[in-house]
Amino acid sequence: MMNVVNDFMQALLNVDRLLAKKIIDDHVSIMHPIQLIEDIVVVALERIGTGWQDGTYALSQVYMSGRICEEVVDTILPPSDPDRKDQPKMAICVLSDHHKLGKTIVYSLLRASGFELLDFDIVEVNDMVARVKEQKIKILLISVLMLPSALKIKKVKKIFKDEGLDTKIIVGGAPFRFDDQLWQEVGADAMCETASEAVSVVHNLMECVS
Ligand code: B12
């Protein structure tokens, strides 16, 4: 698997869309799409991010890698399951930052697993709270990839508390993988390391909401 990750990473760094797509296409028949994304795409992007941080790669390479992955991932995400489950109202969003790929994957995975959920896309705190109230959201999934965005969840939680909202918050994204206490510090009800975990975590939380 490490060789495949290396090849995929090189294709991204060389901005070779065709090769990147071919590597993914070659594996999609032997791996579940979400597994493939987590074992190849996420790992390669993380390594590119670390390489940018230590000065090995340029931000333009991070940017183009992200764009190519968005295109490639889009072609393999599973279709939604028409047999919707009986469930509390849910929504997903990116809070404040502009890293959308994780959110897109979690959204597709939950829909493919039979859940219906709204996509608020990128939102700021006040807009998010207003939409949660308007739509009577019971479970809110928040994706963030930057620490300052993660810390804003504290404010969301405080407003929910002050206004008597019992909406449960599930968080995910890089800052929570870097620091495994952070989800509790920001007041979330649950955290997922990967998109695959979202289905069982949502199931567990569904039992706590009316
Ligand atoms: C690609 C990328 C970009 C692209 C984004 C393109 C796009 N449209 O998404 C671009 C070039 C635009 C970008 C810009 C920046 N980036 Co950037 N970026 C990345 C990189 C390399 C990969 C992110 C990614 O897409 N990963 C793949 C996805 C699929 O993984 P994921 O989001 O983690 O999601 C998985 C899980 O976490 C989980 N998940 C995610 N969210 C949720 C939510 C829920 C509810 C659940 C259940 C699960 C879940 O499911 C997914 C699948 O398993 C990361 C490195 C990293 N380690 O993450 C840096 C990184 C996030 N970026 C970083 C930074 C600093 C920036 C910039 C500030 C750089 C700059 N100086 O301009 C800007 C900020 C832009 C902004 N305002 O948001 C830092 C953040 C550091 C920090 N501590 O805050 C990182 C960590 C890089 C680093 N090592 O320093 N970036």
Image (cartoon, rainbow, N blue to C red):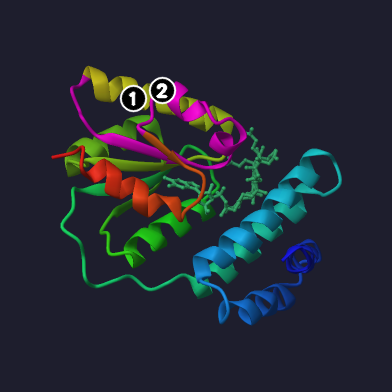
- Residue type at numbered disc 2: Lys
Residue 63, x across and y down, in percent: 69, 54
Residue 8, x across and y down, in percent: 74, 67
Q: Residue at x 47, y 59 (%)?
A: 105
Residue at disc 2, secondary structure: helix
The residue indicated by pointer 2 is: 154
Residue 17 horizontal side relative to residue 115, left or right: right
| Quarter of the C terminus within the rendering | top left
Q: Which residue lies furthest to the left in this view?
A: 210
**Residue 58 seen in the current view:** yes
Magenta highlight range: 163-189
- Residue type at numbered disc 1: Lys
Q: Which residue is drawn at 58% across and 40% down?
A: 174
Is-magenta flag for residue 182? yes
Query: Quick one: label 2, few (<14), some, or many (20+) residues within 10 Å?
Result: some
Q: Residue at x 22, y 42 (%)?
A: 137
Is-magenta flag for residue 139? no
Residue 118 horizontal side relative to residue 79, left or right: left
User: Answer yes or no: do the residues labelled 2 and 1 have beta carbons within 8 Å?
Assistant: yes
Residue 184 horizontal side relative to residue 147, left or right: left
Q: Is residue 183 above or below residue 80?
A: above
Q: Residue furthest right?
A: 56
Quadrant of the rendered image holding ligand 1? top right
The residue indicated by pointer 1 is: 157
The alpha-carbon separation of the residues under discs 2 and 1 comes to 5 Å
| Quarter of the N terminus within the rendering | bottom right
